Every structure is written in structure tokens, then in C-alpha cells.
Image: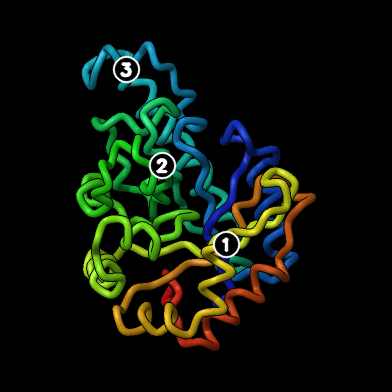
Amino acid sequence: MLQDLHSHTYYSYCGGDRPEEIIEAAIAGGIELFGINDHVNGVITHVPEWDALGKDGWGSWVYDRMLHRYHDHIGLLREKYAGRIKILQGIELCTLPYALPLPEYLDISYFDYALIEHIDMKESITGGDLFAYADSVKCRCGVAHTDLFAHAERLGIPAYDWFSRMAEKNIFWEMNVSYDSIHGYREHPYMLRFFDSPEEQEIIRRSGAEISIGFDGHRVKDYLPERVKDYCRRAEKAGIPLAFAER
């Protein structure tokens, strides 16, 4: 299935387009499964001062309703475009304490998936424990734009063991194929290496872990659906299972 499971709209502070615009660009580009996952701190218009009020305060009330409003909006579009494209409702979770992560008291279990970022940074609130954090999220999780082979090596965990645990926990690994103005037209080295490494691909196959393909789009004008589809086909040709391919 030709998928793109990483896209942003104006709900992300860094996104620039209406959800309808990016969906229509994906349809025009021949994408079959499209995930929209705006940054959580953009969706809930995160106000740090409210965090001090805790789960019973004003901040909790506002944040929860903002998340539901966002989910409902994308859900309406999911229905509108049904039959033309399959849409998944996601959210992207920053895990850096100074970059406004998801308050721990918020429930996002109703989302189709969450992309977790920054787990390889020492400041991450995950403390390096992806699996405990993913359990706390309570919806399906993926790891965004991260070199997980390098991360496992730093933790002293054999790559096969790491990805086997990911498979056990139903956590997928994103192949971020972005190439756009927002990201300075850079390509992720880990992604390029993976698609050129039969050894890494074999570890993923044997472990049972799944990957996703995501352009990480922030501007429709930069969108390259042919690039996305090319990497989907490369994964399928290599026998690498794609997340949500059954849908």
C-alpha cells in the first residue's frame, strides 16, 4: 500500500496548509493511506503556565478539548474523502521538557497512532525507555526520524533484540523521506543507509518489526509524492512490512 504517515497542517506551528489541501495533494499524488499527525504542542496551543494547575485545573480542561476538536476535524475529513483515500488520525509527541511535551495526564488513546520524537536525546522525558513511554500513551506508537540502530547500540542492546521488542509492543519505525524547504532539503542519513543495507533490512524482517514511510510534509508546494511512493515500493520489494498496510 502506498502510504505517507507523517504530515502537518496549520495545526502545527510549523505547518502552513489547511488539512483539505494536504489531503487533496496526497490524492492527486496517488497516495492510498495518509496519516495526519500535527505536533501536540501546536494542537493544544500549549500554555506552560497552565501546566502548574495540574490535571484538575484549567489547563487540563482546555488541552483535552483542543485535542478532541482536532481529532473531530480530521475525522470529518476522513469521512469526506472516504473512497478516495484512507486517512489515519495521528499526533506527534515531542519528548523534550523545554519543547512542551504532552502533559502526562492527557488521554490520547482515541488516536490511530502517535509518532514519538527525540527519544535519542539525553534530555528526553522518556529517559531512554521508549517502551515504558509508549505504554503510557495507550495508542499505537511509531518512532519518528530517529536512527534506532545507533540508539540501540548506545544503550548496549543488540539491534535484533531492540527491534524484536518493538515488534512485541507493536511499535513501528518511521523511514522519514523528507526533502523540502522547511528541512533545508536534507535527507536523513539513517534512512538512506537502511535502504542501502541488506544487513539492517534482514534484522527488521527477522524481528517482525514494521516500518512506516513518511514525508514529514509542512508545505503542499514542497510535496513529492513520487518520492514517497518510490520508498514504499522499495520497502515492499525488500519484504519489509509497512505499518497499517492491512487497512
Q: Earlier in the sequence, mark 2 or mark 3?
A: 3
- Relative depth, front residue between 179 and 197: 197
* The N terminus - image quarter: bottom right
Q: Which mark is residue 51?
A: 3
Q: Quadrant of residue 218?
A: top right
Q: Is residue 219 left or right of residue 109?
A: right
| Residue tagged 2 | 93
Q: Which mark is residue 189?
A: 1
Residue 66 in the image: above or below residue 168: above
- Relative depth, front residue between 95 and 141: 95
How many angstroms separate mark 2 from mark 1 (CA)? Answer: 22 Å
Q: Earlier in the sequence, mark 3 or mark 1?
A: 3
Residue 138 visible from this viewpoint: no
How many angstroms separate mark 3 from mark 1 (CA)? Answer: 36 Å
| Residue 169 rendering spot, x and y as whole percentages | 23, 64
Instruction: Indicate which label's residue lies in the foreground, 2 or 1.
Output: 1
How many angstroms separate mark 2 from mark 3 (CA)? Answer: 16 Å
Q: Residue furthest right?
A: 221
Q: Quadrant of residue 155?
A: bottom left
